[in-house]
Image (cartoon, rainbow, N blue to C red):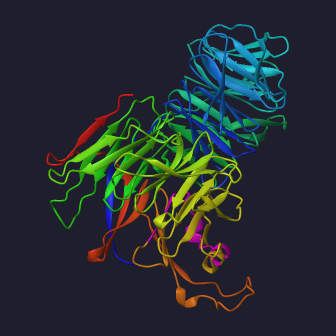
Amino acid sequence: MGSFDVHRVNFFSPELLSIQCMVVENETQKLAVGRSNASIEIWDVSYKPHIDRTLICDSSVEGLAWYNGRLFSCSANGTVTEHDLHSLSPLYNKTVTSGSCWCIAIHKDSGRLAAGTQDGYINIFEITSDGLTYDRLLDKQEGKIICISWDSSGEWLVTGSINALRIYSRRSGHALHKLPTGQSETIVSSIAVTNDFTIISADSRGKLCFWDGNKGTNIANHQALKSIALTVCLDESQTKVYCSGVDPLIVCYELIAMKSDMSVECNKWVRSVQLVAHTVEVRSLVHFKGKLFSGGIDGYLSVSSYPPKHMVKYPPLMSSAISLASDARYVLMLHSSHLDVWYLGDKHKYENKLSKLVTIKYSKNDYVRCSAISPDGTWIVYSTEAKLKIFSLIMDSVTCEPMIKKTGIQPVDCDVSTQLAFSSDSKYLWFATKHENTLVCLEMSHKFDLSTKYCIDTSPYFKDLIHLLEVSKWNKYVVAADRKSNIVVFNEGKHYCTLPKYHCSPTSMKIHPTTENLVVAYANRNVVEYSLSRREYTDFSEQLFLNPPPELINRSFPINCITFDATRNDSIIFSDDNTICVLTKDENNSKDPEKKIKKLDSKPIKFSLKIIQNYENSRHPQVDDVLKNCKLTRLTVCELANEPEISSGSYHKMLTEID
């Protein structure tokens, strides 16, 4: 591997949005995370947790529930919404009676959804293939319903509100029991119900209370936290309960079989381990497959397990948050309300200091799904939920000031996009449309007469949204991948080949600029190398797949970026959220090419693996071969950090969109 100058782009400071609620579905192994900006992230937690897709809601997300792969949410505007996971848009809204809807719960066996409202009403809906059908309205209670849960039979509903819990009969619609919390005002924040109808509640006193749902009596109270408890959850065996809140300590209580004085065996909830996964308020807990998922004000998704004690924190960052223009040495950064274009400084030339060139502002209501900058830095593209927007960025040859202009006329094929990719010569823009399920190639021109070169119908090849898109050098091959692990290669606008399907989704891929080999990393961190010219896996790929290095596989984060060493063809650079891995092949130990029968016990191809772990929350490492004359390459690493002040001598232009 060649020597590198490491350029730490540590001024990227995106807004970290707090987690409001979470829910997991066992069958699809998808975790839905509701955030404070009215967005819902769908995380794939089947292997290494990563963001699968992001949904945008019309109003706040107060509660979430899964039903057979269908996702429902409730909001403060008094609606229950089902979301289309393919179009990433709401399917329909159902208005509840009456006021804001603060919580929902689904009983999967009966297919019924219960929604609790501001005015104390419980709305029951039946879930059908066509949507939600109104079933009944239960008796009104005093005060708003903060939390709600079904029992295992689907005959009883438990609600939490101010100063009391209530148990309702679904058939009669009446409250069977009212369970008071005490004399002082207490807000019941969260509840969980076991199969034997034990009700567990967390409240504003920091107490964890256990109730007998059959008798309507209190079993035990525990002072779990020093401050307000906001969330509680059970593990799959229902022998452990976790609690947290304003006091960010996560406390576990375990059901233990004990003998009384009369030698009668009984079960008792006893305080067990405690975890410190956050330093600020925790708002939601979910237990799935031996792992505890937690989230709150800090915006990080924390995954904890015990024993052994292990914790990983995942930042909520999409791969499209960073885009690099390697030829121009620009970096495009996506924020919640604007895009920034920075020029990277040069440590060998003091006059070429770091500077911000352009800021493109947009409305906070415009959610930007993806963005990209061309390698030569002359084109900036981003897609909102409404349209695709293209800008031209030119540096004035006299004043050296940036000039930016929005293209007013675009081809009819410019639909809302889910993925963007430029060719290496910046002459072509490829993008995957959200609605028409097509792959479009635009021929770029600074005369603003953009034309469509290719428009490919991808419906025969993909069953889900395209989430990865790569273009080879000189626009020869374009490779697209979806979440169903379909990876398809196109050549000159036509289908070229399809890679063998793997059992988990790809998280990153890249085409080598010289060998034209496609390197794909999957969610379990397995890596394959595919020869596009021969349409088959390389020998190195087969050996790497059969004998993966533990240092590469046994890491907690998925691979989110792949790049190459421009000085040699035998090195592959992988990165995740805190690690850079450099894999170097040993070509001297390759197998005999004349041997046609491959044996599993044959001597594997040797390779070396170097791990660099000095990058916390790194995004999009990229090798910039901009200094070819000096035979020097740069490794650019973008990290989360505080944004520095811009020097007074830097050129800075701002463009604010008014649509």
Q: Quadrant of residue 167?
A: top right
Q: Position of residue 354 (x, y in %)?
A: 23, 54
The magenta-colored residue range is: 543-564
Q: Residue at x 20, y 56 (%)?
A: 353
Relative to residue 238, is residue 537 depicted above or below? below
Decide which of 353, 78 is in the foreground and name it.
353
Quadrant of the snapshot with the N terminus: bottom left
Side of 16 relative to 119 (left or right): left
Q: Residue at x 14, y 48 (%)?
A: 649
Q: Residue at x 49, y 47 (%)?
A: 318
Quadrant of the snapshot with the C terminus: top left
Q: Residue at x 29, y 45 (%)?
A: 643
228 magenta-colored: no
Side of 602 relative to 612 (left or right): right
Relative to residue 579, is residue 440 depicted above or below? above
Side of 346 relative to 453 (left or right): left
Q: Position of residue 299 (x, y in %)?
A: 48, 39
Q: Position of residue 380 (x, y in %)?
A: 38, 47
